[in-house]
Image (cartoon, grey):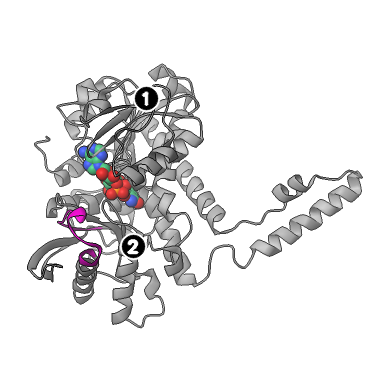
Amino acid sequence: MSTYKFFEQVNHNFDLAAPYTRFEKGVLEQIKVCNQVYSITFPIRRDDGTVEVIKGWRAEHSHHKLPTKGGIRYSHLVNEDETKALAALMTYKCAIVDVPFGGAKGGISISPSKYSVTELERITRRYTYELIKKNFIGPAVDVPAPDYGTGAREMAWILDTYRQFSNDLNAEACVTGKPIQQAGVRGRTEATGMGVYLGVREACNDTEDMKALGLKPGLEGKTYIVQGFGNVGYHSAKFMSEHGAILIGVAERDGSVYSEKGIDPDTLLQWMKEKGSILGFPGTVSSKEKYKILEEQCDILIPAALENQINEKNASKIKAKIIAEAANGPTTRDAHDTLKKRGALIIPDVYLNAGGVVVSYFEWLKNLQHVRFGRIEKRFEENSMKNMIDAMEKISKTSFSDQERLNLAQGAGEFELVMSGLEDTMITAYLEINELRKKHTVDLRTASYINSINKVGTIYEQMGIFP
Ligand code: NAD
């Protein structure tokens, strides 16, 4: 395990990038520090009648833009340092993808599997109440979202609790990642995985980089291994495989499965849901050893579980040419150096898993607008396109098939608009960091931090520092 704490590692990455920016020491220090941390303990009654004290945190790293934004994590490993590190990553991430939020993160130190659904609901509602009391939640203040161990269900509980204390017309924007029926946005569940696929695709389209790695440009035919088959891991795999990459291995909490011939992500997910484990999946070799598989030969390794998974113990044994950091902080600083020395391309977390917050931003906008994306213009667009097709048919004296008409005259619905906004954001951000990488001859991680320091620092220079 790394000897550095997670927040130290994030700050180390910041320090590597800072000399490439124009900001004075004080401004850099202000960007780096965590502005506010709320440490919470509260009791809940368990189903068996006993009382248990629960420990949680909410960290708001930077208030240069409001609201602050960041997920809520449920894991027995959650601690204050981790929450601060993840909040800082959110600040840098939002800046890289031009999402106008400061960074925040929340966490509760519990293993969700050890609690019943009703207990989890009590914990979530009480945590939300504590955040409300201290003004650590609100559409204009701080907006949580799902992270490791939480999902749409928890976000719905948070919204419902918030509503009981607020008659704010915009209350729905107090949390994102909600179910569609509770003012969520289509595409949020798959957003982070879709963003991972888009970022990897951009990296694989760089002919020079692929040549240096001895790989052909493009995603088609590239083999990959995923660690963690939860929300981010599964969706990354789904979109990677749909676009021609071949999933050859998956690691989960209780072991791993491997097949040279390829694994279908949807069938594996179905198996995992039915059996409660990926092990024994037909056509694969199963092992109870969950870390060895990260060292298998493959083109792309996607860590999508937790931090510090690629560390000084296994970094030198990892053979993947591309490390696509879907999880937050999966590579320790020493491991990063080892991989880099070997010539691996590391697509950093702070850019690669930003798809979630991008679509959370869209959800927040939807909630403030009180209207579904595409609702007003979809039919109008379709009718205009139909009129255009009719005119083209008349002029050319040929006619389109029903399928062609359908394809051409399709107005964009919410899902299509969200995905299009996400794709544009991931491409633009990659171009920006790739340009900085080349300009300063640094790696993608340092380039990403340079980009965010430039954006956040400019705002701090212009405002927010009292004379
Ligand atoms: P999740 O809870 O849905 O899934 C995580 C999966 O990892 C689980 O299936 C768990 O069993 C597995 N896992 C845990 N320890 C493991 C180990 N040692 N080896 C293999 N598998 C292991 O969580 P998630 O939302 O997919 O988050 C995963 C990572 O992505 C986290 O680092 C999170 O911060 C990051 N992330 C998530 C989002 C999001 O929108 N959910 C956005 C950005 C970043």
Q: Is residue 415 visible?
A: yes
State yes or no: residue 108 in magenta.
yes
Q: Say the numbered circle drawn on residue 259.
A: 1
Closer-to-camera residue (275/382): 275
**Quadrant holding the N terminus:** top left
Kind of residue indicated by mark 1: Ser
**Coordinates of residue 140 in the picture (x, y in percent):** 34, 71
User: Measured along the vertical axis of the image, is residue 320 above or below residue 456?
Assistant: above
Label 2 or label 1, whichever comes before in sequence order: 2
* Boundaries of the magenta span: 105-120
Q: Based on the displayed image, in which of its 4 quarters is residue 440 positioned?
A: top left
Q: CA distance from mark 2 to mark 1?
A: 34 Å
State yes or no: residue 233 in magenta.
no
Q: Secondary structure at mark 1?
A: loop
Q: Say the numbered circle drawn on residue 100.
A: none
Mark 2 packing: few (<14 Cα in 10 Å), some, or many (20+)? Answer: some
Instruction: Determine if the C-beta at disc 2 is less than 8 A from ligand 1.
Output: no
Kind of residue indicated by mark 2: Arg
Q: Say the numbered circle drawn on residue 153.
A: 2
**Coordinates of residue 168 in the picture (x, y in percent):** 37, 80
